[in-house]
C-alpha cells in the first residue's frame, strides 16, 4: 500500500443482474444475491470439459417453494420456464466432477429478457486518492444535467474484490460519485499495490 497518497475514503458499489456471480461448479452452491423482482433465471455454463450436466434451482414461485432443473448437453446458456421471486439454493450434477470444472452463473431477467439489476456493495472504507483532470466541460450540457469530467481514482489494492467498468465509487466525505470506465493494477498486475481507475465524475448541479 502506498499510504501517503491515499487521503480519501470511498465505498464501491455495483449494478448487477446476477443472482449467482460466475462460480466454479460445485455439487451445492448458494445464491450470491436475491432477485429484486419476479424473474426468469438465465443459467450459463462455460469452460467445462464438456459442460454436460444439470443445474437445479430451488426457490419461490407464486408464493410457493419449488425447484426447476435445467439440463445441459454442452457449455452454453438456458433459461428457466418458471419466474422466481426468491432463491433458496442451487445444486448441480455431472458438472463438478468434470476434469475441467465449468463456471456457472445465473442472471435474473424480466419476461422480455431485460436484466433485472440491483445495486450491491463490493467494498467499503477503502483508502483512495482522487485526481480530477482540468478539462473544459461540455457546453452543450445545461443546468440540471449530469456533467462528465475525467477523473483518476487510485484504490488500495485488495484480493477481496476487483473493481470493474460500470462500478460506482462513492467518496464518503463529499458524497461525490465516480463511474468506472477502465481498471489497471499498479505497479505490476502480478504484485499490485493499487487499482488505478479511469472514471467520469458526475456533477448534478
Image (cartoon, grey):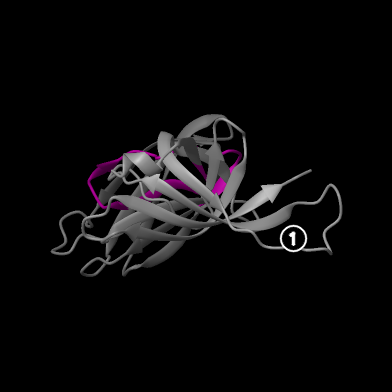
The answer to whether any part of residue 16 appears in the image is: no
| Residue 82 left/right relative to 157 | right
Which element carries disc 1, helix, strand or loop? loop
Report which residue position mark 1 lands on.
Answer: 137
| Residue 146 left/right relative to 101 | right
Along the viewing direction, whichever of 181 and 192 lies nearer the viewer: 192
Position of residue 148 relative to residue 171, above or below, is: below
- The C terminus, quarter of image: top right
Q: Position of residue 195 (x, y in %)?
A: 37, 52
Magenta stretch containing residue 19, yes or no?
A: yes
Along the viewing direction, whichever of 112 and 131 lies nearer the viewer: 131
Quarter of the figure with residue 139: bottom right
Along the viewing direction, whichever of 94 and 137 lies nearer the viewer: 137
Along the viewing direction, whichever of 39 and 33 lies nearer the viewer: 33
The answer to whether any part of residue 55 appears in the image is: yes
Quarter of the figure with residue 2: top left
Residue sitting at x 31%, y 55%: 54
Residue sitting at x 55%, y 37%: 171
Q: Residues within 10 Å of mark 1 (few under 14, many from 20)?
A: few
Quarter of the figure with residue 103: bottom left
Position of residue 192 relative to residue 85, above or below, is: below
Q: Which residues are magenta?
A: 13-41
Position of residue 182 relative to residue 82, above or below, is: below
- The N terminus, quarter of image: top left
Q: Position of residue 113 (x, y in %)?
A: 61, 58
Q: Position of residue 45 (x, y in %)?
A: 34, 61
Q: Position of residue 136 (x, y in %)?
A: 72, 63
Residue sitting at x 55%, y 56%: 199
Magenta stretch containing residue 154, yes or no?
A: no
Amino acid at each position: 500500500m502506498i499510504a501517503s497518497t491515499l487521503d480519501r475514503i470511498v465505498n464501491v458499489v455495483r449494478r448487477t443482474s446476477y443472482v449467482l456471480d460466475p462460480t466454479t461448479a460445485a455439487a451445492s452452491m448458494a445464491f450470491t444475491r436475491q432477485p429484486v423482482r419476479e424473474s426468469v433465471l438465465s443459467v450459463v455454463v462455460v469452460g467445462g470439459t464438456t459442460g454436460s450436466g444439470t443445474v437445479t434451482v430451488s426457490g419461490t414461485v407464486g408464493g410457493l417453494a419449488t425447484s426447476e432443473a435445467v439440463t445441459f448437453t454442452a457449455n452454453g446458456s438456458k433459461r428457466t420456464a418458471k419466474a422466481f421471486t426468491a432463491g433458496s439454493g442451487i445444486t448441480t450434477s455431472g458438472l463438478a466432477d468434470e476434469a475441467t470444472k465449468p463456471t456457472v452463473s445465473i442472471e435474473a431477467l424480466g419476461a422480455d429478457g431485460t436484466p433485472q439489476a440491483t445495486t450491491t456493495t463490493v467494498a467499503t472504507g477503502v483508502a483512495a486518492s482522487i485526481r480530477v483532470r482540468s478539462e473544459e466541460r461540455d457546453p452543450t450540457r445545461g443546468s440540471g444535467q449530469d456533467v462528465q469530467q475525467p477523473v483518476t481514482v487510485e484504490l488500495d489494492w485488495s484480493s477481496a474484490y476487483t473493481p470493474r467498468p460500470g462500478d460506482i465509487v462513492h467518496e464518503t466525505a463529499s458524497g461525490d460519485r465516480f463511474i468506472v470506465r477502465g481498471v489497471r493494477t499498479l505497479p505490476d498486475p502480478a504484485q499490485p499495490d493499487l487499482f488505478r481507475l479511469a472514471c467520469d465524475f458526475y456533477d448534478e448541479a
